[in-house]
Image (cartoon, rainbow, N blue to C red):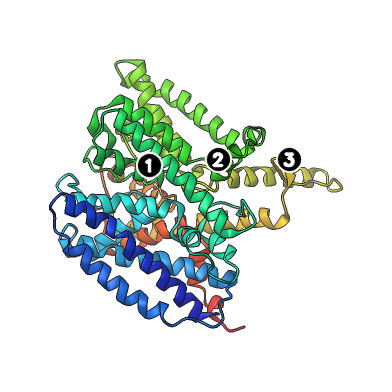
Amino acid sequence: MNYKMIGYLLGVILLIEAALLLFPLIVALCYGESTLPYLITIAVLTVFSLFLVLLKPKNRQIYAREGFVTVAISWILMSAFGALPFVISGAIPSYINAFFETVSGFTTTGASILTEIEGMEYGMLFWRSFTHWIGGMGVLVFMLAIIPSMGGQTIHLMRAEVPGPTKGKLVPKMRHTALILYGIYFFLTLLQIILLLICGLSFYDSVVNALATAGTGGFSVLNDSIAGYANPAAEWVIAVFMLLFGVNFNLYFFILLGKIREVFCNEELRAYIGLFAFSVVAITINTSHLFERISDCVRAVFFQVASIMSTTGFSTVDFNQWPGFSKTMIVLLMIVGACAGSTAGGLKVARVLILIKSGFSEIKQVARPRSVNVVRLDGEVLSAETVKKANIHLFFYVLLICVSVLAISFDGFGLETDLTAVLSCINNIGPGLAFVGPMGNFAGYSAISKIILSFNMLFGRLEIMPMLILFSPFAWKRH
């Protein structure tokens, strides 16, 4: 284990976080608010990170183990330091609550302990939404984009942070891949800001909502989430962009290259759009009696399905009041999530396709033992290693859910609340059902349960394995 290189990378990441805190500081200055919480946090981060960065390692080589450990520790530290402005300002006096809220922000979950949002300062609300944007694409991807060369095999950092069953380079150099990804990310965010301004939202509201949408996070600056704007045009814009940010960013790069056919032939994209369309139609039919006009029903369902499937978590209606079929569909969409290589959470459509195809392949193998069966995705044969990883991910995913639901059940909220709370956190969605539904929050859980749910968010955002490796004794053994 190259401890010095891990420390150096962590120092760089925390320096980046210190620099990013300048943005909410500027917002606070613009609105005449206190800048002390940001200045203190920036000072603490700078001192801590400089201590790590100045100890430059001679050996800059990193491998898979170092990559996974670095990513896992960096996300924990970023959340731990990122919670300080909330505590120092008194916006969230409890550090456990502030840590939960910050982890929820960086992991793009959107689960909240806040019962009154609109009373918070503009700077704090901006930092809260900005954590979504930072965590959406990943801070290590950002680091790879802005720093010419970190040395070693930086592909391991990207593989540990970018969500999905398979990761790779868009172009030969990893830094150029990171630049392309962030370029697309920034452009789509800017485009949404412009469209929301056209729809009549203020500049501040347009920015914070675009940041939350881009990261598929769902933190809103209003108590009633997007419903508080009562702006149908803005709802449609946000809904469409939630879907767009749930698409694999590699496909946007293919569009730039003019490879349109490859985009539309992509199995994951077709399954993503097909599942979305089916869900909208089915839930619209099931909930049409709850709305006065069918157009209102279609808009509400379109928005909510886009929000849940992209794991954003914005809401315009209380889907907790929908019929049983619709709520069941919502829970299933929570589990599936959106596309690999997007800013969304969940199992990912690609992984679900791999699991389904490998299951049918196994059935064929049992029925015809002499036949040769392979799993294909987009016409290409998937390696046994890729299929194996998908199955291992599912095993630990189910195990983590079972253990977590059992652990938080002592708080006495009931199975529906506890199960959907864990599903919401591990799939990085935000709202669940019952007490943690779109009109509720996570404030009622005990401090221990909030810590467990915080780590559920981290496990989900980092695709489980980096966190497992961090806490595994095997990762820290010399041989």
Q: Are marks 3 and 1 in contact (CB under 8 Å)?
A: no
Could you say where residue 251 lies in the image, as x and y percent from the top left? Answer: 58, 41
Mark sitting earlier along the chain (3/1): 1
Kind of element beneath mark 3 = loop
Any part of residue 244 in sight: yes
Along the horizontal axis of the image, is 367 left or right of 352? right
Q: Residues within 10 Å of mark 2 (few under 14, many from 20)?
A: some
Amino acid type, mark 1: Thr
Name the residue: 50% across, 70% down: 69
Whole-number angstrom distance, CA of label 3 to CA of label 1: 32 Å
- Please state which amino acid type lies under the numbered disc 2: Tyr
Q: Quadrant of the C terminus?
A: bottom right
Q: Which mark is residue 252?
A: 2
- Where residue 14 sits in the image (x, y, percent)? 37, 68
Judged from this view, the residue extending furthest toward the top is 293
**Relative to 61, is 141 on the left or the right?**
left
Give SS at disc 2. Answer: helix
Quadrant of the rendered structure where residue 76 is?
bottom left
The N terminus appears in which quarter of the rendering?
bottom right
